[in-house]
Image: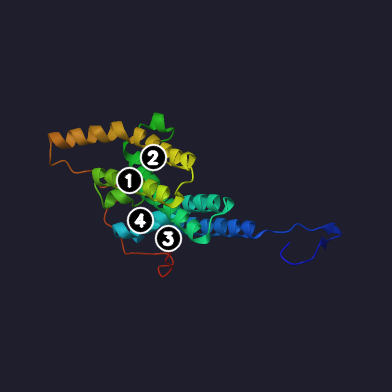
Amino acid sequence: RVDKEMLRRNKKSHKISNKRVRILDEIKDATDKAILGQGRDVRSKSSINSLEECMDLYKLKSGSLYGAAMSIGAILGGAHVRTVYRYRNCGYKFGAYVFQVNDDLCDVFADPEKMGKPINQDTKRKNILAFLSPEEARDLSERSKKEVLNDLYEISGSRDIGNLTDLLGFIAEEQNALIKEGLEKYLSKKAENPKIEEDKINQQPEQPQDLNANNSYDI
């Protein structure tokens, strides 16, 4: 219940705790941002024109979901509002800079049989490989993963967060395992012929068409 009524329709009403309200707010916020991000992704060929815009899209599309997962866990654990905010930021960073970057690499370099789905499904959309080489994208993901884990250890202090860090490490390593063989073959060919250019999965954009361009989100 959101008011002080003890009965509703002749039945005892259930009190909605502040914790539940905060969790619902997190879910709604993440859902709204994910939907906005997915909409921008569909139009990314014409609306994403820089690495910064690409990462902003990733923060909406994937970062918001990981951010909500971490913030909800922190809320359930009774963390202070500022601590919840810091956990949310770690989730945003992992979702955008680790998971989503690796996902783009998987779409190009993974073995479809091992991944369980066809690759090269994002060729009509613009992703990070339009702005970074595969090596640079991989390095960004690895560096970001280490930063997230370090941030989590700093936030947690003496609390045991082994399950959380193990899970994030597992997700990243599973993606890396899918990417490794294909990326190594690409790098080997590139070493043999330095003139080899990586595939331009996304060509030059058409006239920019951004959705809700003035709407920005701080993480």
Identity, as a three-letter code, of the amino acid under mark 1: Ser
The CA distance from mark 4 to mark 3 is: 12 Å
CB under 8 Å between discs 3 and 2? no
- At horizontal 46% and vertical 49% (from top left) the residue drawn is 156
Identity, as a three-letter code, of the amino acid under mark 3: Ile
Question: Considering the image in quadrants, where does the C terminus appear?
Answer: bottom left
Residue with the mark numbered 3:
219
Regarding residue 42, the answer to whether it shows in the image is no
Q: Give the mark toward the camera: 1 or 4.
A: 1
Kindly identify which numbered label has been placed on residue 55.
Answer: 4
Q: Residue 101: x and y, percent?
A: 35, 46
Mark positioned earlier in the residue sequence (4 or 2):
4
Secondary structure beneath dot 4 equals helix
Kindly identify which numbered label has been placed on residue 141.
Answer: 1
Residue with the mark numbered 2:
172
Mark positioned earlier in the residue sequence (2 or 1):
1
Q: Give the mark toward the camera: 4 or 2.
A: 2
- At horizontal 27% and vertical 44% (from top left) the residue drawn is 139
Q: For this rendering, which residue is in front, 206 or 199? A: 199
Identity, as a three-letter code, of the amino acid under mark 4: Met
Q: Residue 140: x and y, percent?
A: 29, 48
Does 43 sit left or right of 195 as displayed? right
Which residue is outermost to the bottom? 214
CB under 8 Å between discs 2 and 1? yes
Regarding residue 91, the answer to whether it shows in the image is yes
The CA distance from mark 2 to mark 1 is: 9 Å
Kindly identify which numbered label has been placed on residue 26.
Answer: none
CB under 8 Å between discs 4 and 3? no
Q: Residue 62: x and y, percent?
A: 44, 51
